[in-house]
Amino acid sequence: MEFIVTKIEEIHDREGNLAGYQCYDGTGQSVKVKKGRDDYLKNKWPSLEVGTAYTFEMGSYTPPGKSTSYPYVQDFTLMSEALAEKIPPLVKEAQKLGAEVIKPDTTKTSIERAVALKGAIELASHDKIDIKNIGSYAKKFTQYLDTGE
């Protein structure tokens, strides 16, 4: 189960001692992060923060003599750490060598395409080109805007 924690509430036992935390997402879905075996999860409680994405590994407990199962958190990991484990080894090696992820600037391209299409429509509305050829003229205009040729 994965979600961004939007709210964290303390859970107390009958004596008033802190027993865990209930973590909620924006839709009301929640998980209880209790102490865990040998306080494993308790040691990770300080890393729980509102606004952070986590992946929760869930287990199921059925009490002896009962037929009802209860879900519980076995472990939790920051989503960024969980995703880092899934990055292909080649990408990790490239990042070690200094490679950077570069995202193309699609804003400029989108604007240029809109300008090209507007120009083709304007020519067609003035009967300068056949309306059936708007697409090909828009492509030519876009190519011209991209390359200047």
Image: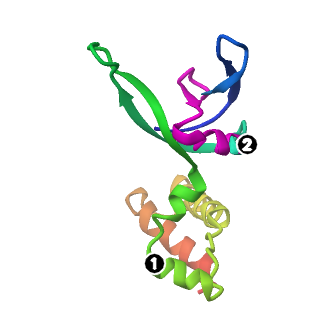
Q: Residue at 65%, 16% (x, y): give it.
A: 13
Answer whether residue 44 is magenta in the image: yes
Q: Identify the image quadrant of residue 71.
A: top left
Which quadrant would the C terminus be assigned to in this image?
Answer: bottom right
Q: Is residue 46 above or below residue 68?
A: below
Residue type pointed to by label 1: Pro
Q: Label 2: state its secondary structure.
A: helix
Spot occupied by residue 62 in the image (x, y as percentages of width and height):
33, 22
Label for residue 46?
2
Nearest the viewer among 75 and 91 is 75
Q: CA distance from mark 2 to mark 1?
A: 30 Å
Q: Position of residue 143 (x, y in %)?
A: 54, 77
Residue drawn at (73%, 42%) of the image: 46
> From the viewer's perspective, is 105 left or right of 32?
right
Residue 58 is a magenta residue: no
Q: Quadrant of residue 107?
A: bottom right
Q: Nearer the viewer, residue 129 or 9?
A: 9
The local secondary structure at tag 1 comes to helix
Q: Which residue is mark 1?
A: 89
Magenta residues span 24-46
